[in-house]
Image: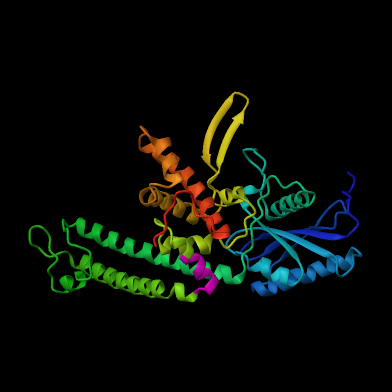
Amino acid sequence: MQPTQRVDRNPVIEGSLELADKSWKIAATDGRREHPAVFKVDTPDLRGRLDELLRRVGELKRRWGLPAGCQVVLIYEAGQDGFWIARALEAEGVRVLVIDAASVQMPRHTRRAKTDRLDALKLLDELRAWLRGERRTLRVLSIPTEDAEARRLLARERGLLQKEIGQHRDRMRKLLRTQGCQDDIDSSLPERLMACKVRRPDGRSIPEELWHWLLRECERLDLARRQFAEVEHTLLHQLPEPVQRCIALLSGLRGVGWVGATRLVLELYWRDFANRRQVGACVGLVPQPYDSGESHVDQGVSKQGNRRVRALLIEMAWAWIKYQSGSALAQWFASRTTGQNKRGKRIAIVGVARRLAIDLWRYMREGIVPAGAQLKF
């Protein structure tokens, strides 16, 4: 087998990172040798692991006779490590591609060998194909800035606290239901528990074990409520002025609240989209047809990208239909769903959500109000 030769004249080290908790596996080549170099970095602390990686890359340059300033391109799959590795490597002059792991092509054998070494080599092959211009399959993610990623946490924390409040309330309701109690889960529940006013239908008191559990649930619920109120009160004030203006612009449309506008701006519209197709693909609301031979199947939407934004856009689409009934989007939905059952409407609302994401992007970018839409003021 002849070694693969690079077609360009500038030497480049191409490498892949297979990340794990205790070690990283790295495969690298300069395109002029038959077998890539594969090594492991297992320094306990992550920063030391990163420094060891850079040191080993420097050794490869000397061993292969490459100039010290030759370009290094690395690739790794997005996961629990997020984007800090990419930002740290780019600060050292390394070009980094962070990819969606689901976009890597894998053999369809029932049983296939899988090791960190093989995965690193597979990623290296994908990188080399991408650099040659074969970019139809591999999905490269946009790396957010530290500020954009930090601001995104504000909206996510609010959503998590809101979910926790609902979980605590639902858990207490179900626990009381097991004893036949239908008491309201409100702020007075702890006082009623302490006064032994929460009783079963026959007048007996609830079990002591359940009584203690409910009191602890009330404490956790109260803490979640206080934290939620604090986050909600300070969220907008922690954002820079340009971001606040974008949120105010979106929330000025009827059917768009400040919570939905905030989440859209922080989760989606921090990106620079080139066209409407990129917007639809980013939120995973584009159709995925299966058209092969005599088989013609509609597989629904791709469901790629940010699932939080996708769920949010579906909710906002229903609100848009209700509060912007005179808009072109609402009329399109009405024309498509006349005489349809609930399932037909749920399918059509996905198209509304995709179009709404594109219309709101144009509204923020070019100031074009969605056709027929009304402002609040």
Up/down of 239 relative to 177, above or below: below
Question: Where in the figure is residue 97, as x and y percent of width and height?
Answer: 70, 59
60 falls in the magenta region: no
User: Could you tell whether 57 is left or right of 238 in the image?
Assistant: right
Question: Where in the figure is residue 119, as x and y percent of width and height?
Answer: 69, 52
240 falls in the magenta region: yes
User: Could you tell whether 196 is left or right of 173 in the image?
Assistant: left
Question: Where in the figure is residue 199, as x and y percent of width and height?
Answer: 12, 63
Determine the residue positioned at 41% across, 52% down: 315
Does the rendering let one see residue 165?
Answer: yes
Determine the residue positioned at 20% across, 56% down: 177
Q: Nearer the viewer, residue 56 or 236?
A: 236
Residue that protrudes farthest toward the left in the picture: 203
The stretch in magenta equals 239-248
Q: Quadrant of residue 233?
A: bottom left
Residue that protrudes farthest toward the top in the picture: 294
Image quadrant holding the C terminus, namely: bottom left
Q: Nearer the viewer, residue 96 or 371?
A: 371
Question: Where in the figure is residue 365, as x and y percent of width and height?
Answer: 58, 59
Does the rendering let one see residue 44?
Answer: no
Q: Main secondary structure of the magenta part?
A: helix
Image quadrant holding the N terminus, namely: top right
